[in-house]
Structure formats: C-alpha cells, structure tokens
C-alpha cells in the first residue's frame, strides 16, 4: 500500500502550523530563527506531533511549502493521503485539549513519541501489525473500549480501560470501538477508531475528549468516525470480512445504545450483523500477543516494581496501629512515588485476618506481637506490580513466626530461580515443585502433611501471569512452557487454621511472600526486588 504524492500548499508567508512543522526535518527551508507559537524556536523537536514516529507500513508522501522559493520537499513516512490533517496553529501547547495526556500537554508524564507512558506510537503500530499477521486474509478484529461504571446515579467509578483495547490502541477513553482490518493476504492493515466526537457542552461537565481528528493525528488511525454511527460504520467492514474476531458477544457492553433496536442487547444485535460461521473468539490471539512482554513493557513493570517495592520497605520501618492507616500509607506512597494509582484493592491483613486469601476489609486493629500480611502494588503506565510481604507489626519475629517465615522464604527463593526459559518448565511445573518444597519444610516443623493437608495449608496456585492485568492474559494456560518475556508472580503461602490438627504455636499464622518476576533466557529478573524480604533486613529497618 505504498504510494507517493506531492502536496503543494499555497500559503501566505507565516509561521508554519504544528502539523506542518511535523513534516519538516532539520534541513528544512524555514527562515533562520523562525519561531512557532506552539513549539518556540524552530530548532526544537520537529518529529511528528505526539507520536513523533510513523508506522513503517504507511505510505510515503512529499510535502513542499508553497511560500518558499527554493525546493524544500521532504520525504517522510505518514498516514495515508486520504486523511485531512488538523492544524494546531492558533493555540499554545498548554491549551491543547485531549481526553488523556499526550507529550505536548504532559511532558512530565510522557516522552516524545509516547502514546502512553513508556510505550511509543511505533510499538502500538507494531502490536496491531502482529495481530493483523495472525488474522486470515481479509479478516477483521473488533474490540470495544470499557464503559464508564457507575456507583449510583451520576456517581462514577474511576475509569479503567479494557486491557486488550488499550494494548492495541493506547486510547484511554470510554465509548469507543477499534477495528483492525487485514487487507487481503498481505501484511498490511487498516486501523479504524470509532469514538466520541468533540462536544463543548459534554466536555464542560466531564472533561476533554480527544475527538475524531485526534484519532488520526495522535493515535494514528487510518479511519475515524462518530461512535453514534457505529452500526453503519461496522456493517461494511463486517460484510467485506472473511472472518470476524471479537469478544464483544461474550462480554458486558454498553454498545446497545448505539444500535437502533431497544429490544435486544448489543450482543444479539451484533451477532445479527455477522454470520455465526465467521464469528471467532479474539481472546486467544490477544493472549498470545500480550503474554510475551516487550522491553518497554518490562521497563514499565520494573518501574512499577521499584516504586512499589520501596513503598513496602518504607512501610516496614514504621509501626501502624490500624490496617486502614497502613493501607493509606501504601496508596499515598505509590502515587507520590510516580505510580498512577494502586493496581488493585490491597490486602492489609493483621493477625488471623491473613488466613483469608483475599481479605480486603482492611478495617481491623494491628496488635503488637502479631504479623501483618500486605498484598499490594502500584500501576505505572498501565502496568502493575504485584507484591506480598509479611512482617511483624512490632518489628521483631517471634520464634514461631521466624521458623514458618524462613521455611516459606527458602521455597520462594528456589521457585523464583526456576523462572527462566532454560528451566524448561511451566507455571504448573513450578507450582508442583513449590508444593513439594513446602510439604518437606512443614514436615520438618512438625506438621502432619498427610491426606489433604497441603490443600488446606497452601490452597492456591504458586503464580499467575502479570502485566496490564493483575491476572494477565485470562484463560492463557499455566501448563505452557515459560518463555523469555513472560512475566509471572511467585507467591507461596501457608495459612494455618486454628485447628488442633496443626502445631499450636503455628495456629492463626498466615504468611505469603510474593514477587513479580520476568522470565529471561538463563536467569529471572525480579521486578520487585526493592521490597526487602530477608528476616535480617526486615528487623534491621527498626534499628
């Protein structure tokens, strides 16, 4: 789909617009010392607006600025020529309004070329290209953005984008649909983004929207359209497709309001647009893409792990009297450390509350002499850290706490060491090794490990995939051999009920130790190493 064109812009001599500046390289014929309203001196970064890079599959075009006497055509990669382009010339960078941060408005959050923190426009394009390559000739993939969720009435929850939608588009607003359309049997594709248009009244109440033009200029869509026209926009794409890959029919959706019928839900109406024989699940294809993390994704997860790990270590330095206070400390420090938010509702479980795996009430008192189990993490650039640490509330382990903790820690270290491609293991294999290690350790501590003992004491899997989701790539099997680029958790835990079946001095103890780990060829990369876990290090924090 490569073609050349020459565009002659007969303009009055004036400072070029931002869209024009994006098409000029350092050899530009602009007058020396010319200044842009938006960018300042022209010597400033002239790479394309927001994305600063164009997808390598895009067509090549020649642009000549008409008011210059000397030849000044420059060749660059660009989106297809059929798009008109918005000129951001009459407003300053500070006045640009989009529905999410971009580099021009939030340079403290995003670098040049990034659509979301750490992830460039080029990487998003590469992801779409990989998905298109996995589609059959003339196949399409359709993804819906998350809906705004309401607590009651007009009171909404914080918006969280559908991870598959975010992974392919970088677009972080509700009420949107993306279509990846493979063009024949080639590697080329079209990216369609249907979204809410700019609306001054709505934006007065709910904040800025990016709008249809930004879908082209910022998010590098080939076609954009008003989401209100979704049925008429989708129908020709579906009619021309060999197969339609989507999960819209299996997930809750607010798309029904964009269809004319009010008597059927959106899934039924969507299915009527597609013959069942052509309808395929998209999730398996997306899981195969998302499970292997890029260097940029790993860097984001490492940053989330670093910020979160330091927060854990700082929390261990202090003695808290309430679970709520400790939870507030964690959330505050995640955010001021650089994370956008907490990655999930944390577990702050003092004493016997740690026996509930997903205890989230977080409203009990923390008592001297007991331990507290904290399962929490921050989110950076959409990617999360998942950490669990258990430590004594008063800073010193009792003998029983020390013995059980040390036994679990030894097994956890051993299991983490298996998170490498050369181990030729799956998460299920690592779980089996972990369970056997815990069983031996508990036996040495005097536990009766016969019968269903391990199902009671260690009732969960040792790990899961982690990334944009806490439990990333849902449905992706844990029986597949781990590969370089997989990111997983390793979280052995022992939870001893108050039951005479178990040694009395261990009853009521719940201890879990968890790290997020990136699988590499010959060794693991621990993403959360800043959270101390050795007993000597934990106790030294109060000295």
Image: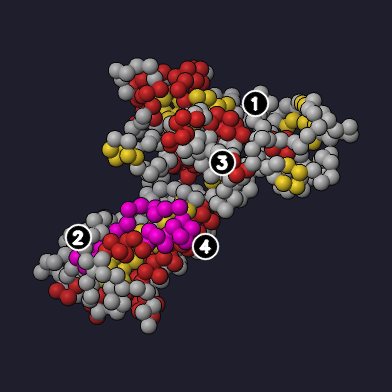
Question: In the image, which disc is placed on residue 389?
Answer: none
- Secondary structure beneath disc 4? loop
Residue furthest to the right in view is: 70
Tag 1–tag 3 contact (CB < 8 Å): no
Mark 1 or mark 3: which is in front? Answer: 1
Residue 100 in percent (x, y) is at 51, 42
Q: Residues within 10 Å of mark 1 (few under 14, many from 20)?
A: some
Range covered by the magenta-colored residues: 330-355
Q: Earlier in the sequence, mark 1 or mark 4?
A: 1
In the rendered structure, does residue 374 fall within the stretch colored magenta?
no
Residue 56 in percent (x, y) is at 67, 38
**Which residue position holds label 2?**
456
Name which residue lies at 81% across and 46% down: 33
Q: How many numbered circles does the render carry?
A: 4
Considering only vertical position in the picture, is 48 above or below 343? Answer: above
**Which residue position holds label 4?**
522
Distance between the Cα atoms at labels 1 and 4? Answer: 48 Å
Considering only vertical position in the picture, is 242 above or below 353? Answer: above
- Secondary structure beneath disc 1? loop
In the rendered structure, does residue 345 fall within the stretch colored magenta?
yes
**Which residue position holds label 3?**
124
- Secondary structure beneath disc 3? helix
Which part of the image, by quadrant, shows the C terminus? Answer: bottom left
Work out whether residue 385 or residue 161 is closer to the camera in this orientation and state it.
161
Mark 2 or mark 1: which is in front? Answer: 1
**Which residue position holds label 1?**
83
Tag 1–tag 4 contact (CB < 8 Å): no
Distance between the Cα atoms at labels 1 and 3? Answer: 20 Å
Which part of the image, by quadrant, shows the N terminus? Answer: top right
Identify the image quadrant of residue 424: bottom left
Name which residue lies at 58% across and 33% down: 214
């Amino acid at each position: 789909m490569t073609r050349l064109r020459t565009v002659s812009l007969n303009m009055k001599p004036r400072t070029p617009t931002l869209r024009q500046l994006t098409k000029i390289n350092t050899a530009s014929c602009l007058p020396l010392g010319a200044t842009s309203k938006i960018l300042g001196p022209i010597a400033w970064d002239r790479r394309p607006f927001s994305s600063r890079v164009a997808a390598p599959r895009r067509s090549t075009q020649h642009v000549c600025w008409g008011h210059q006497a000397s030849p000044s055509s420059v060749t660059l990669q660009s989106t297809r020529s059929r798009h008109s382009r918005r000129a951001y010339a009459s407003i300053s960078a500070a006045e640009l309004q989009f529905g999410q941060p971009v580099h021009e408005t939030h340079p403290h959050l995003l670098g040049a070329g990034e659509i979301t923190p750490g992830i460039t426009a080029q990487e998003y394009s590469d992801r779409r290209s990989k998905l298109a390559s996995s589609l059959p000739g003339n196949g399409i993939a359709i993804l819906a953005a998350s809906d705004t969720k309401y607590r009651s009435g007009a009171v909404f929850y914080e918006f969280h984008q559908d991870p598959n939608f975010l992974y392919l588009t970088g677009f972080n607003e509700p009420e949107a649909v993306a279509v990846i359309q493979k063009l024949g049997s080639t590697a080329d594709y079209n990216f369609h983004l249907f979204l809410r248009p700019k609306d001054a009244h709505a934006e007065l109440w709910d904040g800025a929207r990016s709008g249809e033009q930004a879908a082209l200029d910022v998010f590098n869509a080939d076609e954009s359209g008003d989401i209100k026209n979704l049925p008429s926009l989708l129908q020709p794409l579906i009619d021309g497709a060999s197969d339609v890959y989507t999960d819209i029919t299996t997930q809750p959706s607010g798309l029904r309001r964009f269809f004319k019928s009010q008597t059927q839900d959106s899934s039924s109406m969507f299915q009527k647009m597609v013959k069942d024989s052509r309808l395929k699940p998209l999730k398996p294809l997306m899981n195969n893409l998302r499970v292997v993390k890029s260097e940029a994704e790993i860097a984001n997860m490492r940053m989330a792990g670093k910020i979160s790990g330091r927060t854990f270590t700082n929390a261990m330095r202090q003695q808290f009297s309430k679970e709520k206070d400790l939870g507030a400390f964690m959330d505050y420090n995640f955010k001021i450390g650089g994370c956008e938010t907490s990655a999930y509702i944390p577990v702050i479980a003092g004493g016997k509350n740690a026996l509930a795996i997903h205890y989230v009430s977080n409203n009990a008192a923390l008592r001297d002499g007991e331990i507290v189990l904290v399962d929490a993490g921050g989110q950076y650039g959409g990617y999360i850290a998942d950490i669990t640490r258990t430590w004594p509330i008063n800073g010193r382990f009792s003998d029983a706490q020390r013995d059980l903790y040390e036994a679990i820690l030894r097994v956890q270290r051993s299991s983490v060491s298996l998170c490498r491609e050369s181990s030729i293991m799956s998460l299920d294999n690592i779980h089996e090794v972990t369970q056997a290690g815990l069983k031996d350790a508990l036996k040495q501590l005097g536990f009766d490990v016969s019968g269903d003992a391990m199902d009671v004491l260690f009732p969960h899997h040792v790990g899961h995939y982690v990334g944009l989701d806490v439990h990333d790539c849902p449905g992706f099997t844990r029986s597949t051999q781990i590969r370089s680029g997989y990111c997983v958790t390793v979280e052995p835990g022992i939870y001893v009920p108050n039951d005479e079946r178990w040694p009395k001095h261990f009853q009521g103890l719940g201890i879990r130790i968890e790290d997020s780990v990136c699988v590499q060829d010959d060794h693991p990369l621990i993403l959360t190493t800043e959270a101390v876990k050795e007993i000597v290090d934990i106790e030294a924090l109060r000295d």
